[in-house]
Amino acid sequence: MRLFLYSVAFWMSFQAHCYGQTAIDTSTAIHLVNKDSISPVNSDTLQQTALFSSREHGKTSLLKKFPPYRDSFSEKMVLRNQNASFGQKFLRGGGMVFGIQLTTFCLLLALPEHFSNWDKDGLQQYRQNFRDAFTKPPVIDNDSWVINYVGHPYQGSYYYNSTRSQGAKVWQAALVCIGHSLLWEYTIEAGFERPSVQDMVITPAAGILLGELFHFASVRMSRNGFKWYEAAFVSIFNPMYAINNGFKFAKK
């Protein structure tokens, strides 16, 4: 029994000695730090550093390239800008849509009036038409059925796929399609005719449905590589996919 008590007493004294030595070493280490070498950080400096860092990150994220590729593990296609921000998708898609709209505008301007139904009587009439677009309600137009029920759904589908082919969500691409449809009616076309009820309904509604169908078909075709007739189909019906992603993909 005495041997047991002596053992316990020895162990407790040994632990106390070790703890005391550790405390002394820690205290010594703390005193070795020179307080004068630690300068306080100004809060304004921290804010400026954080602001600069966020600006640099924003510039980098908008300029950073996200090319399309085929994932070697899952064998799935990763679309261009699929991992980028929606802002980057929107800027790229908007630029492409603007280019196509400008081309369409020039084409319709060159066509006869009986085909486009655009009033081309001069700048004064253009200003009045533009004013009427925002002061009077939309009208039922008398355009050809080919323009209203073939051309405008196709137009809406490439509005939709300008961002959908970059990996945007369905609702994001749908909002882009609606926005571009209104932009066409109330800015580009408004100088020649009043906004059309059919165009503002059919372009986004049919365009979203057709656009998603074309997008689904394009992604399915890409799984095993595009045959020549599949590439031709995508180039005609889903040109935004062809522009953004092409038909040959590197593996990663």
Image (cartoon, rainbow, N blue to C red):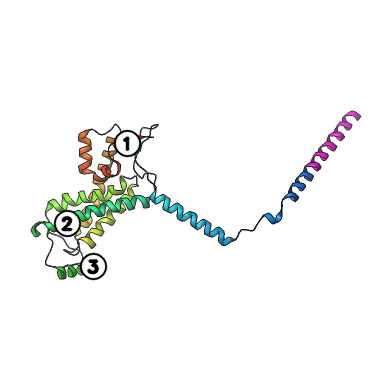
* Disc sitting over residue 106 in the figure: 2
**Mark positioned earlier in the residue sequence (1 or 2):** 2
Q: Which image quarter holds the C terminus?
A: top left
Magenta residues? 1-21
Amino acid at dot 2: Cys
N-terminal of the two: label 3 or label 1?
A: 3
Task: Tell me where residue 235 sits by quadrant.
Answer: top left
User: Local crowd at mark 1 within 10 Å, few (<14), some, or many (≥20)?
Assistant: some
Q: Quadrant of residue 219?
A: top left
> In the rendered structure, are the residues bearing label 1 and label 2 in contact, judged by CB atoms less than 8 Å apart?
no
Give the residue type that dot 1 points to: Phe
The answer to whether residue 113 is left or right of residue 17 is left
Q: Where does label 1 land, which residue?
A: 249
Q: Are marks 3 and 1 in contact (CB under 8 Å)?
A: no
Q: Please state, as top left, top right, bottom left or bottom right, where the N terminus lies in the image.
A: top right
Magenta residues: mostly which secondary structure?
helix
Side (left or right) of 115 relative to 159? left
Q: Would residue 1 be seen by someone viewing this image from the given angle?
A: no
Q: CA distance from mark 1 to mark 2?
A: 34 Å
Q: Quadrant of residue 185?
A: bottom left
Please state the horizontal and vertical placement of residue 184, each as a whole percent of the image.
23, 58
Res 134 label? 3
* Marked residue nearer the N-terminal end (2 or 3): 2
Q: Label 3 is placed on what type of residue?
A: Phe
